[in-house]
Amino acid sequence: MQENLSRWVLVAVAAVVVVAGGLYLFLGGNGDEAPVDDGGDLPFGGTPLPDLPGVPTAVAGTGPIGPERPEIGNPAPDFALLGVRDGETLFKLSDFAGNPVVLNWYATWCGPCKEELPLYQDASVALEGEVTFFAVNLLEPRDRAEGLLEELGITFPAVLDPNGAVSDRWRVTNMPVTFFINGEGVLVAQRIGQVTETELQTRLAEMGVTYAP
């Protein structure tokens, strides 16, 4: 009797382990490595972003291009999204190839984003033709996303990620977040959290661009 009881206990423990492992793989263990965050903050978690009520779905021809994930030292994954200002112009990240790109995610509910965007606007004016600043709005209707740009006087390109597909591919789970891409299209750095003027100067210098506000 004791031997049979022990055998059933072992079987039960093994079943619990198998179920727990399956749940881990289903909920988050997708095997993708998170990119290195050399900004000193928490790394991206890779959690899929939820759809929000009232937010339009993505249209055909937009979203991630290819299966790649962002990795420091590798080409930045391409994507195509519609512009915030008219909802019709299609922008691709690869459109800006040949120039360094500062790629920033923002939302109207993100306080640090509102403080950070004017810094990028000033730099985009000072570095016109040398660096492209490019913003992605996270899961918001076009009028709301555009309203913040108008309020802050932002003129550089901005696009909508209405269902979070591109944000999910780029593992954007924290706001704000900024990626720094050199003129060859290679991801050289990323920053989770608000970027300061000094840090922006440093990141641009790493891409061979001098910025003296």
Image: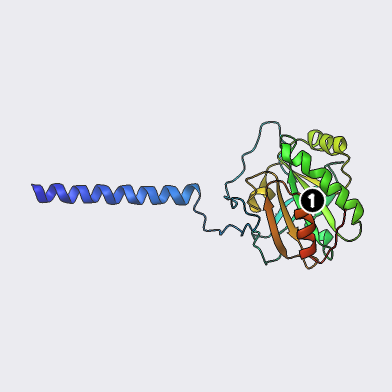
**Residue 59 figure quarter:** top right
Considering the numbered disc 1 on the image, is that residue within a helix, a strand or a loop? helix
- Visible in this render: residue 61? no
* Residue at 86% from the left image edge and 41% from the top image edge: 85
Q: Is residue 186 above or below residue 25?
A: below
Query: Looking at numbered disc 1 in the image, what kind of residue is underneath it?
Result: Glu
**Residue 66 figure quarter:** bottom right
Residue 117 location in percent, x, y? 80, 44
- Visible in this render: residue 105? yes
Q: Residues within 10 Å of mark 1 (few under 14, many from 20)?
A: some
Residue 27 location in percent, x, y? 49, 47
**Residue 40 figure quarter:** bottom right
Q: Residue furthest left?
A: 1
Return the residue nearer the eye: 98 or 43. Answer: 43
* Residue at 84% from the left image edge and 63% from the top image edge: 209
In screen coordinates, is 116 left or right of 125? left
Residue denoted by label 1: 197
* Residue at 79% from the left image edge and 50% from the top image edge: 197
